[in-house]
C-alpha cells in the first residue's frame, strides 16, 4: 500500500512537472506596426512576468507584415496601423474574423530635427515649400499607412503638388523618424506616438483629423494562431495593456 501510494505520488509529480514544462515552452508571435514597437515591447515583457509564455515580436510596416503573413510567416496575432492591411488579410481568409477589433487610435504630426523648427500653419494658403529646405520624410506613400495618411493630408491642404518632389518614402514610420533625427530630412510626417519617444525631433503641428482617414489600429488573431495566443490577445485589450498604450500616447478605441 505504501509502495503504491509512493508510486502515485511520483507519477503525479512527474505529470505536474511535464505540464509546467509544456506551458513554459508556449510561444506567441505577434506582428505589429512599427509605431507600436515601444508599447508592445513593454506589454510583452509585463505579460511574460505574469505568464509562462514567451512573446516573440516582429515590427515593420503593416504592408510588409501583411504580405509576410500571406506568404505563411508564423504569426499568431496581427496589429495593423490601418484597416486596409487588416482587410487585405481578411479577404484572403487568413484571420479569425470574430477576433478583429479596432484597438487604438493615433494622430498625424509634422516634425523637424531638434532645434531646427520652422513655422507652419495647417492652412490651404500656407506656403509649405517655402517654410523649410531639403526633404520631407514619411512612409512609402502607396503602401505604408503613415505615408498613405500623409498623402491624404497633403492633398487635402493643397500642399501635394508643391511638395511631392521633395518627399522621401521610407519602409516604415520609424525609418522616417530616424531620417529626421539625423537631419537627413528637414521635415517629417509621423505619428504623434513616434515623435513622443524621440528627444531628437520637435513637433511643429498636428494635422487636422479631418484631413485624412481616421487612424485606426485593428487587432486580430491569425487563422493559424496557437491556443496560447488567445491569452495574450485578451491581455492586449486589458486595463494593464491600455495603461501602457496611453502612456505612449495612443488613444483607446476599444471600450
Image: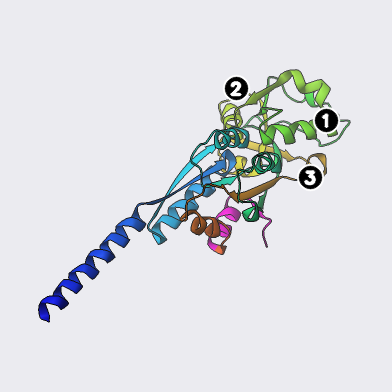
Residue most extreme to the bottom: 1
In percent of width and height, residue 23 lies at 36, 58
Any part of residue 106 in sight? no
Any part of residue 24 in sight? yes
Q: Which residue lies under the disc numbered 1?
A: 155
Q: Residues within 10 Å of mark 2 (few under 14, many from 20)?
A: some
Q: Are marks 2 and 1 in contact (CB under 8 Å)?
A: no
Q: Which residue is drawn at 68% across and 63% down?
A: 255
In percent of width and height, residue 130 lies at 79, 22
Tell which circle, 2 or 1, labels the residue nearer the N-terminal end: 1
Q: In which quarter of the image is residue 162?
A: top right
Left or right of residue 158: residue 85: left
Q: Which residue lies under the disc numbered 3?
A: 209
Alpha carbon separation for disc pair 2 and 3: 27 Å
Instruction: Write down the region rendered in magenta.
Output: 240-255
Tell which circle, 2 or 3, labels the residue nearer the N-terminal end: 2
Q: How crowded is mark 3: few (under 14 residues within 10 Å), some or many (20 or more)?
A: few
> Quick check: 121 above or below 167?
below
In percent of width and height, residue 191 lies at 66, 40
Query: At numbered mark 2, what does the secondary structure look like: helix, strand or loop?
Result: loop
Q: Which residue is drawn at 48% across and 47% down?
A: 41
Which callout, 2 or 3, points to the residue nearer the camera?
Answer: 3
Query: At numbered mark 3, what does the secondary structure look like: helix, strand or loop?
Result: helix
Alpha carbon separation for disc pair 2 and 1: 24 Å
Q: Between residues 201 and 151, which one lies in front from this camera angle?
A: 151
Q: How crowded is mark 1: few (under 14 residues within 10 Å), some or many (20 or more)?
A: some
Q: Which residue lies under the disc numbered 2?
A: 184
In percent of width and height, residue 213 lies at 78, 42
> Quick check: 97 above or below 16?
above
Quadrant of the drawing holding the N terminus: bottom left
Amino acid at each position: 500500500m505504501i509502495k503504491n501510494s509512493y508510486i502515485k505520488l511520483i507519477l503525479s509529480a512527474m505529470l505536474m512537472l511535464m505540464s509546467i514544462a509544456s506551458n513554459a515552452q508556449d510561444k506567441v508571435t505577434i506582428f505589429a506596426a512599427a509605431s507600436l514597437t515601444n508599447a508592445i515591447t513593454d506589454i510583452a515583457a509585463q505579460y511574460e512576468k505574469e505568464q509562462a509564455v514567451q512573446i516573440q515580436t516582429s515590427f515593420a510596416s503593416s504592408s510588409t507584415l501583411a504580405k509576410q503573413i500571406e506568404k505563411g510567416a508564423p504569426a499568431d496575432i496581427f496589429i495593423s496601423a490601418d484597416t486596409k492591411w487588416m482587410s487585405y488579410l481578411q479577404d484572403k481568409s487568413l484571420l479569425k474574423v470574430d477576433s478583429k477589433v479596432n484597438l487604438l487610435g493615433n494622430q498625424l504630426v509634422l516634425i523637424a530635427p531638434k532645434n531646427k523648427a520652422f513655422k507652419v500653419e495647417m492652412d490651404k494658403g500656407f506656403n509649405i515649400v517655402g517654410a523649410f529646405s531639403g526633404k520631407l520624410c514619411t512612409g512609402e506613400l502607396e503602401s505604408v499607412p503613415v505615408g498613405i495618411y500623409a498623402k491624404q493630408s497633403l492633398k487635402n491642404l493643397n500642399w501635394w503638388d508643391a511638395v511631392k518632389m521633395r518627399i522621401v518614402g521610407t519602409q516604415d514610420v520609424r525609418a522616417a523618424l530616424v531620417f529626421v533625427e539625423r537631419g537627413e530630412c528637414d521635415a517629417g510626417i509621423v505619428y504623434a506616438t513616434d515623435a513622443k519617444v524621440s528627444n531628437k525631433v520637435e513637433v511643429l503641428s498636428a494635422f487636422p483629423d479631418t484631413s485624412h482617414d481616421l487612424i485606426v489600429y485593428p487587432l486580430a488573431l491569425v487563422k493559424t494562431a496557437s491556443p496560447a495566443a488567445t491569452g495574450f490577445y485578451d491581455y492586449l485589450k486589458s486595463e494593464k495593456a491600455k495603461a501602457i498604450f496611453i502612456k505612449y500616447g495612443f488613444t483607446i478605441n476599444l471600450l
